[in-house]
Image (spheres, rainbow, N blue to C red):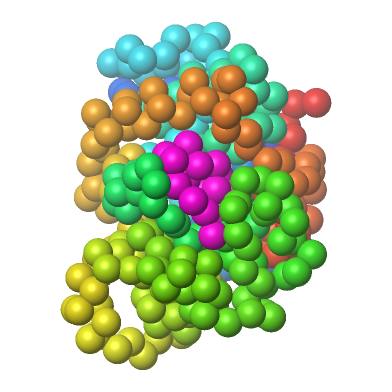
């Protein structure tokens, strides 16, 4: 029997329960992996309260990010073998394949090699955040050397990774945070400028920093009422990439600046590239290979450094979710399965 996390009702973190289940042998194209560490994402909490892109059938699993070792492979699996150390990328329904537990069944095309240089906690912090920022900034935002990117809500796991990714692409980075005490952390992580949105006018500060030219790319996790200011912060030919909706209110947008400045507005989820078969999205295989070959060497040699904020035991999964939703973390919250 294997201990996994399930929830049988929607609600607060306390609905998450550790249960014992007999995991089956992996089916065609699937792998069973023994898990050492699990990275938490905002998407996990959204699934738990039924505010995610899918409504799960209860009881539901959850979770995308894990690091571990291949225990068994199903028919047709050729990219990994028993004994391989692997990490997961978000290429599946977390409700169906969720990785919260001592072991999990996952699609083989959701596995990348786990670089030896990374501890388990760091390896479990790679999948969602680094694929999200790679495809969002490079493929959708088309951020290039010499341009400037504005990154909102930058103190989460994806935010710090976005700073790293933008710098790897040769860009200047303006990061935002609501809290003054987090500004120095963003500067130390590589941001060139930080705007504290609770104290400063976002649009005015962007134009001051860029001498009125505006930024080329906005990579936004907030949406809502900040959208007009973010659009006005873009220069001519600017690209707005929305990858999250922390603010569910609908903004009122003046369309004339969008038209006059030739702005591109893109809603984006990483699954457009990594795949989500349950929602009809196939994996873009060559794009995923390119992302793997760009990211893994940089993770191995330290050019990219996953930031872990706090670790919890698997038994303390409810407390870990409470910490995730407190918005106090700087980086990734991780469940440690194997000490």
Give the camera-side residue of 2 and 154: 154
Give the camera-side residue of 98 and 222: 222
Is residue 216 rendered to the left or right of residue 335? Answer: left
Q: Main secondary structure of the magenta part?
A: helix
Residue pictured at 46% horizontal, 66% vertical: 210
Q: Is residue 123 above or below residue 272?
A: above
Is residue 239 rendered to the left or right of residue 171? Answer: left
Q: For the C terminus, give its image quadrant.
A: top right
- Residue 264 in the image: x percent, y percent? 24, 66
User: Could you say which quadrant of the image residue 78 lies in?
Assistant: top left
Q: Is residue 2 visible?
A: no
Q: Which residues are magenta?
A: 158-174
Q: Is residue 272 visible?
A: yes
Give the camera-side residue of 171 and 132: 171
- Residue 188 in the image: x percent, y percent? 71, 47
Within the magenta stretch, is there residue 5? Answer: no
Q: For the N terminus, give its image quadrant.
A: top right
Residue pictured at 57% horizontal, 29% vertical: 303
- Residue 88 in the image: x percent, y percent? 49, 32
Q: Is residue 333 above or below residue 237?
A: above
Residue pictured at 60% horizontal, 52% vertical: 191
- Counting the numbered discs, the total is 0
Residue pictured at 22% horizontal, 50% vertical: 280
Give the camera-side residue of 186 and 311: 186
- Residue 116 in the image: x percent, y percent? 61, 14
């Amino acid at each position: 029997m294997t201990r996994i996390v399930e929830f049988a009702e929607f609600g607060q973190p306390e609905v998450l329960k550790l249960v014992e289940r007999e995991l089956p042998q992996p089916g065609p194209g699937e792998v069973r992996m023994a898990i050492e560490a699990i990275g938490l994402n905002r998407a996990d909490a959204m699934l738990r309260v039924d505010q995610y892109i899918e409504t799960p059938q209860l009881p539901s699993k959850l979770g995308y990010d894990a690091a571990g070792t291949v225990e068994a492979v199903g028919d047709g699996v050729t990219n990994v073998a028993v004994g391989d150390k692997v990490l997961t990328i978000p290429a599946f329904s977390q409700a169906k394949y969720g990785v919260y537990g001592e072991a999990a069944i996952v699609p083989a095309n959701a596995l990348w090699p786990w670089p030896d240089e990374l501890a388990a906690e760091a390896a479990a912090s790679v999948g969602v955040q680094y694929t999200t920022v790679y495809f969002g900034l490079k493929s959708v935002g088309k951020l290039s050397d010499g341009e400037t990117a504005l990154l909102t809500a930058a103190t989460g796991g994806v935010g710090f990774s976005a700073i790293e990714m933008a710098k790897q692409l040769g860009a200047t980075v303006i990061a935002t945070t609501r809290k003054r005490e987090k500004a120095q952390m963003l500067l130390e992580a590589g941001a060139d400028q930080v705007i504290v949105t609770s104290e400063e006018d976002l649009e005015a500060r962007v134009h001051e920093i860029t001498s009125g030219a505006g930024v080329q790319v906005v990579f936004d996790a907030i949406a809502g009422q900040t959208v007009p200011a973010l659009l006005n912060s873009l220069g001519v030919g600017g690209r707005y990439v929305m990858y999250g909706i922390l603010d569910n209110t609908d903004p009122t947008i003046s369309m004339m600046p969008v038209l006059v400045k030739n702005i591109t507005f893109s809603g984006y989820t990483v699954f457009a590239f990594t795949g989500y078969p349950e929602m009809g999205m196939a994996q873009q295989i060559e794009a995923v290979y390119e992302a793997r070959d760009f990211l893994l060497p940089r993770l191995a040699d330290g050019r990219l450094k996953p930031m872990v904020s706090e670790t919890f035991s698997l038994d303390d999964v409810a407390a870990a979710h409470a910490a995730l939703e407190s918005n106090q973390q700087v980086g990734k919250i991780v469940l440690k399965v194997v000490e």
